[in-house]
Amino acid sequence: DCVVLGDTGHSGMWMGGMYDLSHPEQSYMRSAGHLGWAFSAGLGAKCAVPDRPVLAFNGDSGFWYHLSEIETAVRWNINAVTLVNNNASGNQSKRGFDRAYGGEQTEQAHELWKLNVVNFAEIAESMGALGIRVEKPGELKSALDRAFSANRPVVIDCVSDIEAMAPLAVTE
């Protein structure tokens, strides 16, 4: 019964590859080019269907675009759950650079896709939302359970490996 939204880029590829649509009444909403869309769209979806759980899956690069909307969610008590795939990078851009330069990038090239390490759970907490940091895969289920029972806006900061590739994103 959960409304699931996936951001563009690798976020959408990760979520789309992990989400089983097995019934005709199910749907998966994904942006096709507007980086950062899923977080704000998740807040809108929660306003539209307040009695349903909402999960917005975002990458850290896209999440930065609308980070201030955590405060909006807190102020208006929009109880959506936002999961941030935090690999401190624009991972999809890294793949393009690796292909273009054979994996031999200069340190300066990293400035185009690498981000500083940030704890989005702490930022969410400082704005009045519930922030949950996940550092190991085994912690994710309990984080989601806690988030969906919190009855307040939640940001799950899921630390991930910059080298991890969405299974459906691999092309030869």
Image: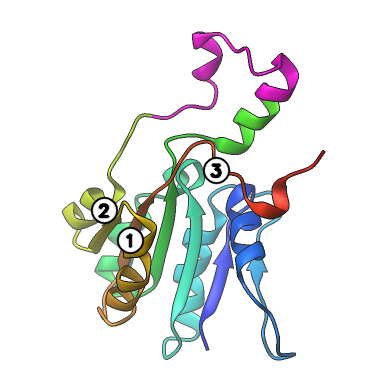
Nearer to us of marks 1 and 3 is: 3
Ranked by sequence position, the earlier of labels 2 and 1 is 2
Q: Amino acid at mark 2?
A: Ala
Q: Provide the residue span drawn in magenta.
A: 97-115
The residue depicted at 50 percent of the width and 55 percent of the height is 58
C-alpha separation, residue under disc 1 versus residue under disc 3? 21 Å
The residue depicted at 41 percent of the width and 63 percent of the height is 82
C-alpha separation, residue under disc 2 versus residue under disc 1? 6 Å
The answer to whether marks 1 and 3 mark residues whose Cβ atoms lie closer than 8 Å is no
Residue topped by disc 3: 164
Image label count: 3
Q: Amino acid at mark 3?
A: Ala
Label 3, secondary structure: give it: loop
Residue topped by disc 2: 121
Label 1, secondary structure: give it: strand
The answer to whether marks 2 and 3 mark residues whose Cβ atoms lie closer than 8 Å is no
Nearer to us of marks 2 and 3 is: 3
C-alpha separation, residue under disc 2 versus residue under disc 3? 21 Å
Question: Image check: 54 left or right of 109?
Answer: left
**Residue 154 pos. (x, y %):** 31, 67
* Residue 84 is a magenta residue: no
Residue topped by disc 1: 155
Question: Image check: 138 left or right of 29?
Answer: left
The quarter of the picture where the C terminus appears is: top right
Crowding around mark 2 (Cα neighbors within 10 Å: few <14, some 14 to 19, many 20+) is many
| Quarter of the view holding residue 13 | bottom right
The answer to whether marks 2 and 1 mark residues whose Cβ atoms lie closer than 8 Å is yes
Ranked by sequence position, the earlier of labels 2 and 3 is 2
